[in-house]
Image (cartoon, rainbow, N blue to C red):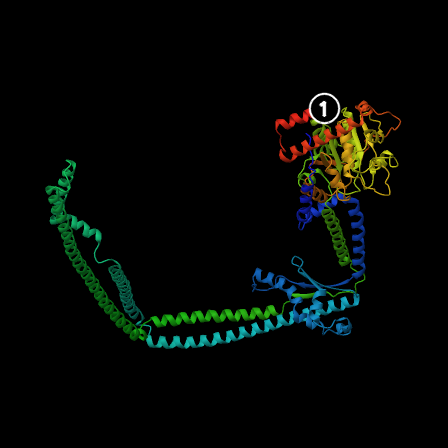
Amino acid sequence: MQIESPTDEGRRAAASDGQAPLMHHAIGASIYRGIPEFSDLVLACRHHLTLTFVVGTVFAGTLAMVAWSWIRPSYHAEALVRVREKQNVVFTPQTSRSEDLAFFRSQAALVRSHQVLSAAFDDDEVQQLTHVVPVGNRVEWLDGLLRVETQSGSEVISITVHHETPLVAQAFCNAITRAYLDEITHRMMSDRKLRETQLEQAVVAADLQLDKLWEDLNSVARSVGSDSSESLTIRDELQFQSYRDYAQQLQAAQLRGNQLQSQLDELQASHEGQPAVSEEVVEKLLRQNREVSTARKQLMGLELQCQQMEKIAASADSPQMRRLTDQRDRFAEELEQLIQRTRAEISETLQIQTQSEHQQLFAKLKQQIELNRSEKEFLRERLTELNSVVVRAAPKTAVPLDMSRHAVERQSRLADGLWKTLQEFRIEGRSQSRVALQSLATLPTQANHSRQLRAAAASGAGGWMLIMFAVGYLEWRDCRVRSPRDLVSRSRVPVFGTNSYAASQSKFGFGFRQKQTSGGVREAAARIFLRNQDSADSVTLMVTSCVANESRHLVSQELAVVLGGFHRRVLLIDCDTDRSQLSRALGASRSDGIRQLPVGNQAPAVETIAALLVATNVDEVDFMPIGTPEADHAWIDPKTLRQVIDALRSRYDAIIVNGPSWMGATEGALLAEEVDSSVFAVFVDDSRWNQLVLCEESARQAGIPLSGSIFHSGTGKSGLRLQPDRSRNDRAASLAADDTESETALRLEIDALQDELRRVQADGQPQGGPKESDTMTAKTEDVTHS
């Protein structure tokens, strides 16, 4: 798999012109991610456990100490009051269980009421402490210092006041307790006096009413007499029985009248809503009419004759056919006229019948309603007569006597009950009160630090949460690469080393960095180089990274060592103009290198290039240093790199260029165009995935092919060392010694022709070219090697 990069100047200009707007889009898509969730920030802190623990502990401790020193301790003064849930009774209880519980629970609200707290400021002890009372709503201030707790089982109410000064807490606690006792005592006494007064008035009124009823009873007994009471009672019973019978009959007649009236209303509504004559009935009677049926049969006979004449192929213009057609049309018109006339007669007849039936039914219902009205009037007259007789005979009967006796007995029982209740209430009033003082508040000697502890704990927890939020937010915004998942989910190119890195991590989640050759390097070597082993030409690859401080030279060394282990001839070229880490790591920072090659269109001789190569401890790997920077130029001309690659391509199976960073050096993109493809070196806990996305987008816009990204741990040693004293094993050294100047020029022309063919294939046929170009390329390579 060999990938050729486009070198057309027009394409470079177009890519550079459209790079700015697309790059802004890439920045927005990769960096701006909205607002993170709190769970994401907490999880992000796991990458900075030590920092989070140290800074969080210091910050939380500082906030806790500030809160502890800022909030002063308070002193609590407590007074106890006993409130009985059940009232002590001698006779029967006058309240229920729910009322007793409601009374006990309402005492806490009474202690905090406005009238009790206002009365507490009038206490003698509080009058001496007016300087501690703030200006404004003093009742709200005192309510904030007060705490009331009820204990239903022990029947005790705890009244607690907290303040920074113990004397103030004691004074206000005792003042509130005394104000509450005065208020509840006054309420209970006033309620008791009011109830006693009401009971006395009710007893007096009941006695007066009882005396009046006794007088009425005596007068009725004198007017009726005891000898005629039985006979008068029997007559009254008969009259009452007749009255009840007539009343029941009147009720039944009224019910029947309502039913008749509703039937009349329904009949009127149905008569108004229904149509005058039903079309279905008219059609049915029309079909039963003899004249209509006879005419229809005659018309059907003529239709049959016409059809038969048409079947025997009679002409429509024949006299007989015309006569039959005219006769059929005439019969059809007569039948239509007959149907219209008959339908009108039938509709009129049906309408007359329907109206007569409704009129008869209306007359019948009206007659029944008139009879019902007469019956009700008769029954009302009878009831009126019986009622007048009963009223006139009432003084002469025994019923008023019994009613008077019953009224006297009932009023007597009421008066006795009221008198009994009044006496019991007076006796209960002398019993012990439901509210009693247990103890007043004493001067508190120990301060309460609960508020300080709560404030310190809340401040410490808040400080911890704030530090976790800050560290997590910084980590979240930092976009560091912590796992292969950060790259796979965002990168558009293959990522090498994801599986090997995941396998190297501990199953408990606390993984260690790889100490041997990175699995990503092996995977990249297999997919980029080893799969291309049948190709006649070598593969050139540039290893780069996003920023300058990333150790991309480790990836270049490991890649060269891995390929050398597979017996591939590898040339490692250092073109890192940022920091020259590869040359420094191998100890060749002061050696001559690619910078010392002449710059121009004329390619340097192969001997000049070969003189700069240095052997390594791996037989198959050679190294070209970057060289010492000169005064006139410190960068590397892309043409120089292309000339070196063209001159040494036939000697090596792979040429690896350790290039500069993509964002740190301006010539990174230019050098990348001179190689087949490029890879980005990505390091755990060092690289940023947003920068990688930006670099990939920039490379895509510039038309530079990318083979992928190599995920690396950032540590380890490849074992590659320089051995300048060892002779290199050049595969084509004899060619370089025997070539004449004409042969060198011919070789350069052939290389240029090969480059031109590869560019044509890459531009016009990216997936496969025609057979003619492949044949020409093969022939050219044969000529080159010969």
Residue 518, picture quadrant: top right
Residue at position x 61%, y 62% in the image: 86
Q: Position of residue 37 (x, y in %)?
A: 67, 49
Residue at position x 70%, y 32% in the image: 755
Looking at the figure, which quarter contains the C terminus? top right
Neighbours of disc 1 within 10 Å: few (<14), some (14-19), many (20+)? few
Above or below, 211 against 484 in this view is: below
Q: Is residue 216 left or right of residue 232?
A: right
Looking at the figure, which quarter contains the N terminus? top right
Above or below, 71 against 225 in this view is: above
Residue 512 can be seen, yes or no = no
Q: Position of residue 604 (x, y in %)?
A: 81, 33
Which amino acid, by three-letter code, is at mark 1?
Val
Q: Position of residue 634 (x, y in %)?
A: 83, 42
Q: Nearer the viewer, residue 644 or 257?
A: 644
Kindly give the residue lying farthest to the front in the view shown: 742
Q: Is residue 147 left or right of residue 255?
A: right
Q: Position of residue 489 (x, y in %)?
A: 66, 40
